[in-house]
Amino acid sequence: MRFFALIFVGLLSLNAHAVTRGNFMGINFIVNITSNSPDGSNDGSPQVLYGLMNRPEQSSMLGPGKALEIDKKTLNFICAKKAENNYHCAILIHKTAFALIGPGRGKFVMQGEQAKALFDQFHTNGVSLTFKDEAGKTLVHMTPESFIIEYNEQGV
């Protein structure tokens, strides 16, 4: 979890003026969703996403956090509770066969058993789960057969 905390601290600087933002990070794509931004806007999306994660809380220097269990060279998906009502989620989509990355957009699609392993790491109704952030830029949709994360600056 310490590794994730260091990545997380670095990612905070990328999110200086937006509640939901996507950026290239080298050849990869990072999606940041924060509760609060310096301009005073607020977004409940990361708190909802944090609650949907069926993962144990782990301590970090930022406070309690949750991370998906997956090959870290494929996808990093972490959410942390920095303070009361102040959450941050960072989704790092690595350039792999599962990723489609372009200007202002990133998409991660996994099928089959690997998708089921990710699906099982969320609180679902057993059939599907769809999450869309308040800004309308990030979509997470999953079934036991398919796991999709999509970010589009223009909206999803």
Image (tube, rainbow, N blue to C red):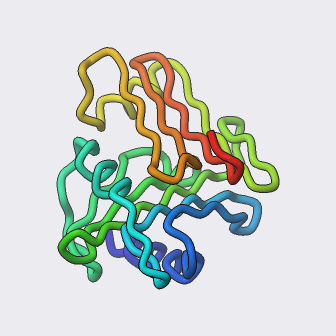
Q: Quadrant of the C terminus?
A: top right
x and y percent of residue 7 in the render? 48, 74
x and y percent of residue 131 in the render? 41, 38
Q: Is residue 59 left or right of residue 90?
A: left
Relative vertical location of residue 69 with respect to residue 120 in this rendering, above or below: below
Q: Is residue 74 left or right of residue 85?
A: right
Looking at the image, which residue is at 55% across and 83% down? Answer: 13
Looking at the image, which residue is at 34% across and 75% down? Answer: 2
Q: Quadrant of the N terminus?
A: bottom left
Relative vertical location of residue 111 with respect to residue 11 in this rendering, above or below: above
Q: Is residue 39 left or right of residue 94?
A: left
x and y percent of residue 18 in the render? 55, 71
Looking at the image, which residue is at 26% across and 27% down? Answer: 124
x and y percent of residue 110 in the render? 56, 29
Looking at the image, which residue is at 39% across and 58% down? Answer: 78
Relative vertical location of residue 2 with respect to residue 74 in this rendering, above or below: below
Q: How many marks?
A: 0
Q: Is residue 154 left or right of residue 134?
A: right
> Is 90 in front, or is 98?
90
> Is 27 in front, or is 43?
43
